[in-house]
Amino acid sequence: MTNVDIRLRNNRIKRNIRKSIQYGIIILIAFVMLYPLLWIIGASFNASANESFWFWPSDFTLIGWKDSLKAPGWGSPEGYSLLRALWNTMQYTIPHVVFGTVSTLLTAYVITRMHFKGKKLFFALIIGTLLMPNTIFRIPMYAFWTSPGIAPLWDGVDAPFLPYLPLWAGSIFAVNSFSVFMFIQFFRTIPRDLDEAAYMDGANKFQVLWYVLMPVLKPIVITVALLLFIAEFNDYQGPLIYAGTVETMPLSLVLPSLGLDSTNTYAHVYARSIVGVMLLIIVFFAAQRYFVGNDADSAIKG
Amino acid sequence: MVGEKKWVPYALLVPWIVGFLLFKLYPFISSFVLSLFVKRGLNSTFVGLDNFKLLFNQSELTGELFINSLRVTFIYVFFTVPLILVVSLLVAYVLAQKIKGIGFFRTAFYMPTVLGANIAIIVLWRYIFEYNGLINQGLALFGVDPVSWLGTPGGAMSSIVALRVWQFGSTMLIFLNALKNVPESLYEAATIDGANKFRQFFSITVPMITPIILFNAVMRLVETFQVFNGPMLITNGGPENSTRVMNMLIYQTAFRDGNLNLGSAMSWILFIIIMVFTVLIFRSSKYWVHYQD
């Protein structure tokens, strides 16, 4: 072997060692992060859960899963079905995602693609409100929604979606500055030539947005919708403040009320929690190829 | 842009303008006004800054609780934000090294961000951190004695910090994207000059992404100062108020006890603290943030 050969071999060994260390770190962190989630699945099948570190159930049972859709004590001793709580959650999550995505997309489109006076001010206000803590808006908004003139619009109204109006009304008006910001960042990466060419052919603003830009915007639209979905589906303080009757309680209020007791074992609690996040997991995996595996996250960058 | 009418952009911005006025500007001003009043029965009386004085009066229970919540919130933020930034940057850095199965790892590291913020999972955190829970079982494998996570102030704080740091996914994705934009030629030049990976990380990678570090730091700061779910559901503020953070105290004062005036005063102090920190970070940025253009 010549000296060059030896050097090359040494370099290759060095590189392999470095790669192994990298994989080692990354696999270890992934394990630490994901193991609690995996363990919960195993524990939901375990009659003596919370007694072992290991994933595999030591004392296999289906007792938790048999009743996993029931919420005993919610409304009545045997309780309503968790599907009802899920539907309650969806009654504010769906309008929030639909209105929130459309209104923030439109706002970002106007800000980035149209010329008008005061544009810089609008942009500054959007960035400014991005940093405003939500906490400061919450109390006056509560006073507003519960005032005698406004409360009859939603409080106790017997119709879908409407009893949750305070939780999603803001999304009609593009109040989510972070979504607007993400759309703005993405619009800026799309060459204007695309719009100009369409205008030459006589298209109007909406046709350009819908037919020309929409195909390019698809990943960011899905990303924003997904983030709005996750945030609203997981919201706790909102429902807690505006909770109406027992029947209208969403998942985030029903699940914490179902702790361990004489009839509910660990297996029950774990199984029910998995049911509670099932839709979230399904939606995340359906949308994630546009999200974490894609250039869409370039829009998140500051 | 042929024949564009001047009013069209404004008309299309009407939803946002209404949202800004009704959902941002109005409550912003209104909460300040509320904080200057006291409600007795049906009458509101103007009391100036009395609510604020009460909050900082250590000899009253209200003041004692509030100052404690300030202290606790600061502890939470000062552990959580640096930990999130360091962990997410480290993971992003390793993932940026052309690793096989990157799609799997990105999804894996993002899962806790999706699920960990969900109430169904937060509730389980209580059981995972209890005395014979998963965490202590895991520590026992390494011969570590069980820790009373939820029974001691330090343990309770650690478990809510851990819950949040666990969800470093979105911060990590932002870093990962920034790292991909660092020109390869810089690393090549450094390698020729004999700088090792460690040197390269601190003298190329970190300086090149300082604007993103600034962005992430500010976003996480604003968010963590308002922490609510973990302390509310895992520790319920305890033990001995060691995790009764500001947002939890605001919730209890305003919505459980119905004192909107005092709650508004608290939320204004929280707002001012967040603004002061944001401004300080932006001010300091001229010493450590490098913009390429």
Image: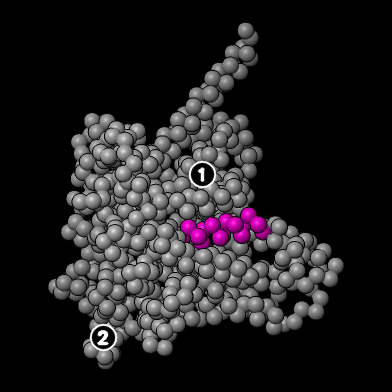
Do the residues indicated by labels 2 and 1 lie within the same chain of the protein?
Answer: yes
Circle 2 Cα neighbour tier, 10 Å, few/some/many (<14 / 14–19 / ≥20): some
Identify the residue position indicated by label 1 in the image. B107
Q: Residue at x 48, y 50 (%)?
A: A281
User: Which secondary structure, mark 2?
Assistant: strand
Q: Is residue A218 magenta?
A: yes
Where residue A64 appears, x then y in whole percent? Answer: 32, 46
User: Which secondary structure, mark 1?
Assistant: helix
Which stretch appears magenta? A217-232
Dot label at residue A187: none
Residue type, label 1: Thr
Q: Residue at x 23, y 67 (%)?
A: B67
* Residue furthest top in the image: A1
Q: Chain of mark 2?
A: B
Q: Residue at x 22, y 41 (%)?
A: B132
B102 vs A259: above or below: above
Return the residue nearer the eye: B153 or B22: B22
